[in-house]
Image: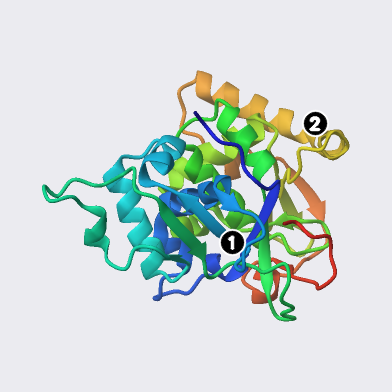
Amino acid sequence: MKFNYTLHSIKIKSEWFDDKDRAKNVYQKITFEGLYLYIKLYKFRLHNQENEHTFITSISLLRKETGYTSSKVLELLKLMKRAKIINIENVSRWDYLLDQDGNIKDKDILIITAIDAISSFEKKDDEYYIYINLDLFKKYEESNMYGRIEKYIALYCLIAKWSNNTEHKMNMRIAKMAKILGFDKDFVHKMIYEMNRNYFMSSHRKNRKGGGYYFEHRLLTSTKKEDVEKFLSSEKENVEKLIKRIEKKKNKKKAIDIEEELESSEVEFVEEMSNIKHGFGKKNNWGEDDLF
């Protein structure tokens, strides 16, 4: 039996994906697999609790939802606790989850709370977040995108964080994306191609009038019919041109380089992605629609 998400959307802190140079951010501490497991917890969320991010589950249930082994789930829970984003409320020591032979007691009930989550009740004026549409992620899982879906979810979060501008587009070199995410650069090229091919994203190359160019990636962030239609009406032509050029190169068995294949267009000068003010994510405004 598989479970549905108990919410349509959640927020995670924008700072989880900060580029901290030598120090690790939360994402890098828990890895893309830990992020995926964290999101899967929202299939087991309990309503009307003191902590609105309270989950009741087991290693066995999390194993079935993620496809990970029991030992991998336990390892990721440890990473998440070490990163101070969850607590296991009913387990004070990890060895309590092992039997006398050292086997994982995967059927034992776990009561987990998210302790670094965005609250829908407490006002914090300086809190920025990444909006995650869980219905959209279900579409990711149902797609035929190449590779592990967890990696696409991590890429989505990174792009969403850096899309804090009026056009909701992100510009960052693929090499930098790969560095922050801990992925191979060639695989990030393939991921961007796959997300375009499935109409989850539209990628552009823009020339500056003063010389040089930069790249833009615009995400589909909703599964609502009117939002999907609006996205396709403005982006489908661009996506299909990109896919056509890449398919031609694939037929010639050449490596995919998205940044080479993106079609150029002339634009006015814009600020560089390195300007940190573009990396906040969305501001958690008090009084907005309650996602929980």
Q: What residue type is disc 2 on?
A: Glu
Q: Earlier in the sequence, mark 1 or mark 2?
A: 1
The residue most toward the bottom is 125
Quadrant showing the C terminus: bottom right
Mark 2 surroundings within 10 Å by alpha-carbon count, few (fewer than 14), some (14 through 19), many (20 or more): few
Give the structural element (helix, strand or loop) at label 1.
loop
Mark 1 surroundings within 10 Å by alpha-carbon count, few (fewer than 14), some (14 through 19), many (20 or more): many
The picture places residue 244, in percent across and down from the top left corner, at 66, 24
Would residue 150 be seen by someone viewing this image from the given angle?
yes
In front of the other: 283 or 50: 50
The picture places residue 249, in percent across and down from the top left corner, at 54, 26
Give the vertical position of 33 relative to 127 (above or below).
Answer: above
The picture places residue 197, in percent across and down from the top left corner, at 64, 30
The residues tagged by marks 1 and 2 sit, at their Cα atoms, a distance apart of 41 Å
Residue position marked by numbered label 2 in the rendering = 237
Left or right: residue 41 compared with residue 30: right
Give the vertical position of 103 relative to 248 (above or below).
Answer: below
Left or right: residue 29 compared with residue 170: left
Residue 53: assigned label: 1
Would residue 272 be seen by someone viewing this image from the given angle?
no
Q: Which residue is rendered at x = 18% and y = 50% of the image?
A: 99
Q: What colour scheme has been applied to the protein in the rendered image?
A: rainbow
Q: What residue type is disc 1 on?
A: His
